[in-house]
Image (cartoon, helix red, strand yellow):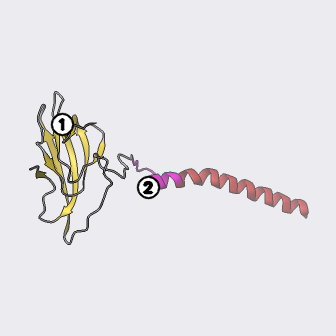
Amino acid sequence: MRQMIRRAAVSASVAAAVMVTVLAPSALRAEEAGGYQTAVKVTPLLKTTTTTSGAAIRYPSFDDPEVTAVLVEIPAGGETGWHIHPVPAYAYVIDGAIEVEMRGGAKRRFSAGEALAEMVDTEHNGRNPGPGPVTILMFATGEKGRPFSQKAE
């Protein structure tokens, strides 16, 4: 009888180990994929707590929130001009590269495949240093009727 109980306990332990070995990785994959089906591939592009200027990300509260998505295309050698984003915005460089300069001369470069959290209320200019156009997909989380970008004064 003892031997039967011992075999059952060993079998249960082996079964538990197999379940952990098989199920744990799929649970991790599901968590990484945000709960999507296993055939769905999720590639993290950006996870940050700061904007490109180093400021902490803050989410403003608006009475009439609005999300805007735009495609920004800058020709070779072109510039955005000095501007600010009064609301949080996020961008993904689809093609080419952009060099972002802040007042005071600090610069950051972002190339195709990179994502960024735009700086808020900080004057900056985007310049395309490349031989071809730069294409950027940008999402802004703002307020209805309020522009997501304004010319710097």
Q: Give amino acid for label 1.
A: Val
Foreground residue among 153 and 92: 153
The kind of secondary structure the magenta stretch mainly shows is loop
Eye-nearest disc, 2 or 1: 1
Q: Could you tell whether 94 is left or right of 84 in the image? A: right
Q: Residue at x 64, y 55 (%)?
A: 19
Q: Residue at x 19, y 40 (%)?
A: 135
- Labelled disc at residue 109: none
Q: Can residue 78 be seen in this view?
A: yes
Foreground residue among 115 and 42: 115
Q: How crowded is mark 2: few (under 14 residues within 10 Å), some or many (20 or more)?
A: few
**Compared to 17, does 5 lie above or below?**
below
Q: Residue furthest top?
A: 131
Distance CA(mark 2)–CA(mark 1)? 34 Å
Q: Can residue 111 be seen in this view?
A: no
* Res 81 quadrant in image: top left
Query: Residues in magenta?
Result: 28-43
On the image, the x and y values in percent for residue 41 come to 40, 47
On the image, the x and y values in percent for residue 12 come to 74, 59
> Any magenta on residue 41?
yes
Q: Residue furthest front?
A: 104
| Secondary structure found at label 2 | loop
Foreground residue among 74 and 149: 149
| Secondary structure found at label 1 | strand
Residue under numbered circle 2: 37
Q: Residue at x 16, y 56 (%)?
A: 148
Q: Residues within 10 Å of mark 1 (few under 14, many from 20)?
A: many
Residue under numbered circle 1: 134
Q: Give amino acid for label 2.
A: Gln
On the image, the x and y values in percent for residue 72 come to 15, 45
